[in-house]
Image (cartoon, grey):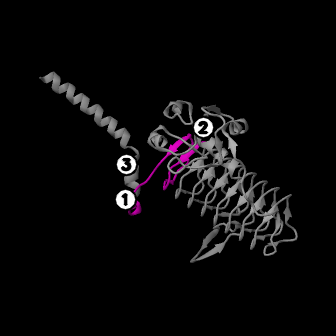
Amino acid sequence: MPGPFTLAQIASQLGGRVAGDPQVLIRQVGSLERAGRGQIAFLSSPKYRARLAATGASAVVLAAEAEALTALPRIVCDNPYAYFARVSQLFNPRTLQPPGVHPGAWVAPGATLGARVSIGAGCVIGEGVAIGDDSCLYPAVVVYPGCRIGARAIVHSGAVIGADGFGIARDGGRWQKIPQIGAVTIGDDVEIGASTTIDRGTMDDTVIGDGVKLDNQVQIGHNCRIGAHTAVAGCVAVAGSAEIGKHCTIGAGALILGHLSICDRVDVSADTVISRSIRKPGTYTGMFPFDDNESWARNTALVRHLAELADRVRALEKRLQGKEGGDG
C-alpha cells in the first residue's frame, strides 16, 4: 500500500490548502464515524458537524465555509467529496488483473486486444471485437462479435456486451425475430458493473460515451445512446432507442422508456419512470402507485396540473376574502 504521506505531500499532489500542522502523517482514509489515528476523513455537508466534532481522524478534508468547524489539521478545497475520492485513490491504487489473457478465457482469432489488456478467467471475446489499451475484463465477461471497447475500460464479472436486442415483430399469432445486425461501441474510461447487459443495435450501434459509469445489473436496450460522463446506478433499465445526454445521473431502479430523448445534465431520482422526453436540465422525480391503465393515465394527467390548480384556488380564495371584507 502506498504512503504514508504528510498533509503537505497530499496537497502538493492533489491541490487544496493545508490548515493546521502540515506534517501530520496519513496512512489511510476513513469515515468520520470510524476513522482513527493516521487516517483522513472528509466532511461533505455541515449537517454532519456532530460527527466531525466526535471524529478520531488525524485530519479532515472540507470546504472553506466549514473550515471553522474543527481545529483538526485539514485540507481545504472546493469539492471535498471529489477530493476525498482522489485521496483514496492515492492510498488505494486500483488493483487490476495481470495483463494478458487468462488460460481459462477464449479470445477469437480475429479479435484485437490493445496494450496491457487483461482478460480474466471464463471470458469469451467474439470475432472482430476490439478492446483498447489498459482495459480490464474481470472473469466471466462475454463480448459478442463486432463490439468495440475503448481504452482503460473496467468491465466487471458477468457483464454481457452485444447480446441481441429485444427486436421482434408480431406476425399473426406468432413473433418474428428481427436480426440485430448492429454492434456496441463503448468509449474510453468506461466502467461497467457486474451482470450489466448492453444490447447490440438492430441496425445502428448501441453507443456508450467516454467516461460513462454503469452500476451493477443495469440493462441498456438496443440502439440506445448514452452521452459522455453520465452515471447510471444499479438496476436501471433503459429501453431500446432511448438517448441520454452527457453529464446525467440516473438513480437506482429508474426506468427510461424507449425512443425518448434526455438532454444533457439531467438528474433522474431513484425509482422514477421517465415516460416522455426531457429537454431542460434539472432534477426529475416521479413515484406513483400502480392502477388499471385507464385510471392511472387519467389520474396522472390531473396530478401534472395540481400546481396550476393550487394557484387558481389561492387566487379564488383571495378574491373571496376581498369580497367578504368589502361586504363587512
Question: Whole-percent x and y of residue 28?
Answer: 64, 49
Residue topped by disc 3:
302
Tell which residue pokes out farthest to the left in this image.
328
Give above or below for 259 relative to 140: above
Under mark 1, the amino acid is: Ser
Residue at image coords 24%, 32%: 317
Tell me if residue 217 comes above or below residue 210 in the rendering: below
Query: Which residue in the protein does label 1 denote?
Result: 295
Mark 2, Cα crowd under 10 Å, few <14 / some 14-19 / many 20+, is: some
Q: Is residue 315 above or below residue 205?
A: above
Give the Cα distance between marks 2 and 3. Answer: 41 Å
Q: Indicate the secondary structure of the residue bearing disc 2.
A: loop
Instruction: Please provide the residue range marked out in magenta.
Output: 265-294
Residue drawn at the location 64% of the way across and 39% of the way down = 24
Q: Amino acid at mark 2?
A: Asn
Residue 286: say if magenta.
yes
Q: Position of residue 202 (x, y in %)?
A: 70, 63
Q: Around disc 3, counting alpha carbons within 10 Å, would you say few (fewer than 14), some (14 to 19), or many (20 or more)? A: few
Q: Does dot 3 land on a helix, a strand or a loop?
A: helix
**Residue 264 seen in render:** no
- Assign a secondary structure to mark 1: helix
* Mark earlier in primary sequence (2, 3): 2
- Quadrant where the N terminus sits is bottom right
Q: Is residue 327 above or below residue 176?
A: above
Q: Amino acid at mark 3?
A: Leu
Residue that label 2 marks: 79
